[in-house]
């Protein structure tokens, strides 16, 4: 079996998963990869599914192939188009460790702007996140880096808030004007992430993930919270949820012939 | 190859779908929290309950303080340029909410227990310290107040008590900052 044919067949296994998730995304529900693997395609009329030998038999130990994968978040670009007051860009990289573990790092920058009648300021920030991803799918070959994963991250973001000017409404006269001096800030947070990445071409991956973030030092912004912190989201929320769509490219070296 | 194209197609669909979820950014801020902070004055009446003990042939009088609904209470701001008034409903209210002036450290209100009886009025004076408070990016800033003391004349009102000196937008329906006592 050629490598290309193998990748194609591997991608076929994700079709039910991707289709189900697309349908259920609005409800915020996503089937587990295990379920997706066990469920035959909807257009298949097989009374008794063929036994999944990969799931029932212990897989042979695979030769170690190094893979470094670099991705760009297309979802953030879409978000930028819809929300001009919150602009951000993110890249993501991971390195395949032995087994099904991946070391992951992400970074990016962003800008925010509030231009309301009663409040005006700008903010800019950049961030770094590091963590690990654990794939829940068995690898079927040395070149099989498709993954449905869960992971954790630690993120730290630094930025600047410009001087903010505001108006406080009053029922007994004109609004009172005020200002808050600009300042630098640092926030850090933890994340839980889950999603999939599928190789659709030679070294080209597409995938998405959901994230839940929990700010560790939310008390930093008692006086004024930036409307957007790159890598985190709204600064006045101590818990936020996010969504990424990655287009990635992987390079591999020390390749050895797959055992499959 | 057809299946691989399907994966790419689904990826694009999810990308377009994410665009569909996100509605266009509103031009106006979407503020869902109260910005106008108000001081709440509750009304309390005193009832006398007579308890008869037939065994010992003794009477006991017990004083009970309970929320008092007034027929049509009203409060009118004094010493400010704008004519500001708060009139309770004709069905009766046991509290009224009034704003404070952030440009001053005290404020007076003319209080009527029944707005149809203009002569029976009292003047309530609130002394406070104001501070600017950030609510959110959508709601902006507002003023919080720390009540220092309260005073009243005693034409209709018997007395006034300060029960909660923090006037903020984080208060329940049952919250009262001051209580006005009426003894029939």
Image (tube, rainbow, N blue to C red):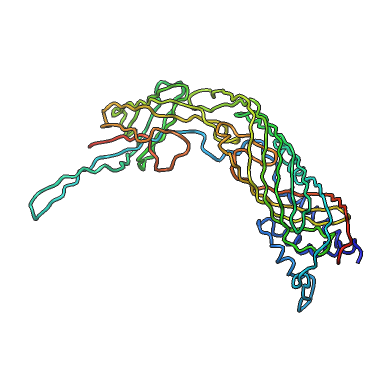
Among all residues in the image, which is located at the extreme right? A2
In this picture, is A47 found above or below B20?
Answer: below
Residue A133: horizontal and vertical position, in percent? Answer: 72, 53
Screen quadrant of the C terminus of chain A: bottom right
- Residue B88 horizontal side relative to residue A24, left or right: left
Tell me which residue sits at (50%, 23%) in the image.
A173
- Residue B175 horizontal side relative to residue A67, left or right: left
The residue nearer to you, when weighing B90 against A241, is A241
Among all residues in the image, which is located at the extreme bottom? A47
Residue A162: horizontal and vertical position, in percent? Answer: 66, 27
In this picture, is A213 found above or below A12?
Answer: above
Q: In which quadrant of the rendered view does residue A224 lie?
A: top right
The residue nearer to you, when weighing A242 against B117, is A242
Residue B181: horizontal and vertical position, in percent? Answer: 28, 35
- Residue A8 horizontal side relative to residue A79, left or right: right
Q: Is residue B109 visible?
A: no
Q: Number of callouts in the render?
A: 0
The residue nearer to you, when weighing A154 against B148, is A154
Residue A122: horizontal and vertical position, in percent? Answer: 67, 30
Tell me which residue sits at (47%, 39%) in the image.
B170
Q: Is residue B16 visible?
A: yes
Tell me which residue sits at (67%, 39%) in the image.
A156
Screen quadrant of the N terminus of chain A: bottom right
């Amino acid at each position: 079996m050629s490598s290309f044919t193998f990748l194609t067949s591997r991608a076929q296994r994700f079709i039910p998963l991707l289709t189900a998730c697309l349908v259920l995304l609005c409800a915020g529900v996503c089937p587990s990869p295990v379920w997706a693997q066990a469920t035959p395609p909807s257009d298949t009329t097989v009374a008794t599914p063929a036994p999944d030998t990969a799931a029932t038999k212990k897989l042979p130990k695979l030769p170690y192939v190094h893979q470094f994968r670099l991705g760009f978040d297309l979802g953030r670009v879409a978000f930028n188009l819809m929300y001009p007051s919150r602009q951000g860009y993110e890249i993501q990289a991971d390195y395949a460790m032995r087994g099904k573990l991946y070391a992951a790092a992400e970074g990016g920058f962003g800008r925010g702007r509030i231009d309301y009648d009663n409040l005006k300021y700008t903010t800019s920030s950049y961030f770094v996140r590091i963590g690990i991803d654990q794939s829940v799918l068995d690898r079927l070959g040395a070149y099989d880096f498709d993954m449905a994963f869960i992971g954790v991250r630690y993120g730290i973001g630094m930025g600047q808030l410009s001087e903010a000017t505001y108006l406080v409404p009053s029922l007994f006269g004109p609004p009172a004007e005020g200002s808050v001096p600009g300042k630098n800030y640092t926030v850090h947070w933890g994340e839980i992430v889950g999603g999939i990445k599928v190789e659709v071409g030679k070294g080209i991956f597409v995938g998405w993930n959901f994230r839940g973030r929990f700010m560790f030092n939310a008390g930093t912004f008692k006086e004024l919270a930036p409307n957007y912190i790159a890598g985190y989201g709204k600064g006045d929320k101590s818990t936020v949820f996010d969504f990424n769509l990655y287009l990635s490219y992987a390079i591999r070296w020390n390749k050895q012939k797959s055992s499959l | 190859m057809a299946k691989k194209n399907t994966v790419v197609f689904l990826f694009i669909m999810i990308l377009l779908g994410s665009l569909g979820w996100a509605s266009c950014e509103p031009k106006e801020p979407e503020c869902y929290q109260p910005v106008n902070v108000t001081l709440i004055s509750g009304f309390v009446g005193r009832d006398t309950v007579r308890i008869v003990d037939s065994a010992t042939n003794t009477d006991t009088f017990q004083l009970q303080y309970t929320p008092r609904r007034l027929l049509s209470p009203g409060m009118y701001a004094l010493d400010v340029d704008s004519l500001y008034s708060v009139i309770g409903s004709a069905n009766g209210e046991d509290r009224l909410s009034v704003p404070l002036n952030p440009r001053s450290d005290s404020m007076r209100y003319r209080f009527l227990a029944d707005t149809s009886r203009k002569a029976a009025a009292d003047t309530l004076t609130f002394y406070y310290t104001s501070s600017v408070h950030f609510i959110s990016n959508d709601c902006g800033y507002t003023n919080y107040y720390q009540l220092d003391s309260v005073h009243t004349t005693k034409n209709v009102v018997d007395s006034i008590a300060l029960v909660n000196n923090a006037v903020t937008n984080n208060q329940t329906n049952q919250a009262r900052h001051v209580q006005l006592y009426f003894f029939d």
